[in-house]
Image: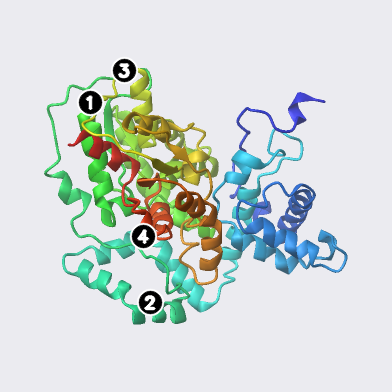
């Protein structure tokens, strides 16, 4: 067999640029032809059936059709499959044997992105969904309103009120049982004033400069700023100079998941000039949320392949445990831990797994654990706003079930995940009598073990 078309293999798949400025990208007939081609191959394989609900939805459409084949499925129903994809990228990176350089050239997530983009462009949403999608994806706007002193407490009270939650489901299709992000007016910007350290002797390596600009993200700036605080303390303890980005905007992932590519480009333009300037000045960039790192490492470079600044940032933005692991290889990661954690159940975030970093978080957590780290490589089901929307909340619970089951059956004292939103969603389903600590990000566990 020609090695170019060989199925499987251990090498990373080839990712093609997303040619969204090409008119054919927006041609509905061409899109449907490509959806048919890919769906037909997926139908014959079915390897990804357990990843999310997109594939069971597709296979059910085929199995329940008149002729038990894709030919007899109404093309209007293709959108049912598209709506179930939340761009986790696991099918492409971990399951599909037909990704490029295979001649069949399958990229299921980016085909779903193309379909989402056309749906968004054609405005095929009811009014409630439009308002909800705008609210859930406009993180800069929402957090700027809700993170004022006193207002944060009012918003948190209202969003925890059962009546308000029922009204949100009725009028905005936000599930009444969904855990919504909280607001915290004591942001990382305010906290950093008491964290700043200038007397660090910067040590560079072949792969890191030892100087980091923290892209704290909307979530870890305004909802759980303690995660960013813990990151700063751990990095400083390891003699890494950390400063906050002077200003940052949403990375664009919430807009990408909607298919709003024009909004993604606007957010890219707001962020890239500043981040590129930091890189030019010799700074590395670290972000605590895997989705945000993935946005700059993969999605923006594929959407804007000719933007030299985007391509430069791609090489200089890091997951925090990727960065610490690189320093560890040079003997610069400190292991002066004061206390150990035991029996850690660890769920690697999907958007971290697909960066092809390897299990860096697990490797570093092993330094603080007296037991083996149990790594549960299954999706949390949260996935952006998927676990918040009324129509997909119950499906999200089903997707997270294998993770919950493994934790409930085990003897764990800690549960952690690289994605703070996934961690909360999974943590809310763990049996209370297990007494499993669920509110610690991996970087927070490291700080706790340092006792700093």
Label 2 near label 3: C-beta < 8 Å? no
Q: Which residue is mark 1?
A: 336
Please state if 241 lies on the left or on the right of 80 as rendered: left
Q: Which residue is mark 4?
A: 139
Disc on res. 79: none
Which badge, 3 or 1, comes first in the chain's sequence? 3
Quarter the C terminus occupies: top left
Give the spatial CA distance, label 2 vs label 1.
46 Å
Q: Secondary structure at mark 3?
A: loop
Front position among marks 2 and 1: 1
Disc on res. 331: 3
> Which one is nearer the viewer's eye here, 74 or 325?
325
Give the spatial CA distance, label 4 vs label 2.
19 Å
Q: Secondary structure at mark 2?
A: helix
Front position among marks 4 and 1: 1
Give the spatial CA distance, label 3 vs label 2.
50 Å
Q: Residue at x 24, y 42 (%)?
A: 230
Where does the image place residue 410, in percent across and percent down from the top left?
Answer: 45, 47
Q: How many numbered badges does the structure rendering display? A: 4
> Pointer 3: residues within 10 angstroms few (<14), some, or many (20+)?
few
Q: Which residue is mark 2?
A: 165
Q: Secondary structure at mark 1?
A: loop
Front position among marks 3 and 1: 1
Q: Residue at x 66, y 65 (%)?
A: 79
> Which one is nearer the viewer's eye here, 32 or 60?
60
Where does the image place residue 53, in percent across and percent down from the top left?
Answer: 62, 59
Q: Residue at x 46, y 72 (%)?
A: 175
Which badge, 3 or 2, comes first in the chain's sequence? 2
Quarter of the image for residue 345 reads top left
């Amino acid at each position: 067999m020609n090695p170019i078309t060989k199925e499987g293999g251990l090498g990373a798949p080839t990712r093609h640029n997303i040619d969204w400025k090409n008119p054919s990208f927006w041609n509905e007939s061409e899109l449907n032809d490509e959806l048919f081609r890919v769906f037909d191959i997926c139908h014959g394989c079915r390897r990804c059936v357990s990843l999310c609900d997109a594939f069971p939805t597709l296979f059910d459409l085929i199995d329940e059709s008149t002729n038990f084949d894709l030919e007899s499925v109404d093309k209007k129903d293709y959108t049912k499959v598209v709506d179930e994809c939340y761009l986790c990228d696991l099918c492409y990176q971990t399951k599909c044997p037909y990704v490029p350089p295979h001649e069949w050239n399958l990229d299921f997530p980016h085909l779903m992105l193309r379909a989402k983009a056309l749906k968004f462009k054609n405005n095929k949403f009811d009014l409630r969904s439009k308002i909800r999608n705008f609210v859930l994806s406009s993180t800069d706007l929402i957090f700027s309103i809700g993170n004022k002193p006193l207002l944060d407490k009012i918003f948190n009270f209202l969003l925890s009120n059962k009546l308000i939650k029922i009204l949100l489901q009725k009028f905005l299709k936000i599930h009444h049982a969904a855990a919504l992000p909280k607001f915290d007016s004591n942001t990382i910007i305010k906290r950093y004033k008491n964290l700043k350290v200038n007397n660090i002797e910067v040590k560079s390596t072949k792969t890191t400069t030892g100087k980091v600009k923290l892209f704290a993200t909307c979530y870890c700036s305004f909802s759980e700023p303690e995660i960013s605080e813990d990151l700063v303390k751990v990095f400083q303890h390891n003699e890494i100079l950390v400063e906050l980005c002077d200003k940052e905007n949403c990375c664009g992932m919430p807009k990408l998941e909607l298919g709003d590519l024009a909004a993604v480009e606007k957010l890219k333009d707001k962020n890239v000039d500043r981040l590129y300037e930091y890189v030019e000045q010799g700074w590395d960039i670290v972000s605590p949320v895997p989705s945000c790192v993935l946005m700059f490492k993969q999605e923006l470079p594929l959407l804007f392949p000719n933007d030299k600044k985007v391509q430069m940032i791609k090489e200089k933005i890091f997951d925090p445990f990727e960065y610490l692991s690189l320093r560890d290889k040079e003997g610069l990661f400190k292991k002066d831990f004061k206390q150990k954690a035991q029996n850690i159940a660890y769920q690697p975030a999907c958007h971290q797994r697909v960066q092809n970093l390897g299990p860096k978080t697990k490797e570093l957590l092993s330094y603080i654990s007296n037991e083996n780290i149990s790594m549960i490589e299954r999706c949390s089901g949260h996935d952006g706003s998927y676990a918040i929307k009324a129509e997909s909340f119950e499906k999200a619970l089903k997707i997270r079930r294998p993770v919950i089951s493994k934790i409930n059956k085990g003897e764990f004292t800690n549960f952690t995940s690289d994605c703070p939103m996934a961690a909360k969603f999974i943590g809310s389903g763990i049996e209370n009598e297990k007494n499993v600590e669920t509110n610690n990000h991996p970087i927070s566990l490291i700080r706790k073990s340092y006792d700093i």
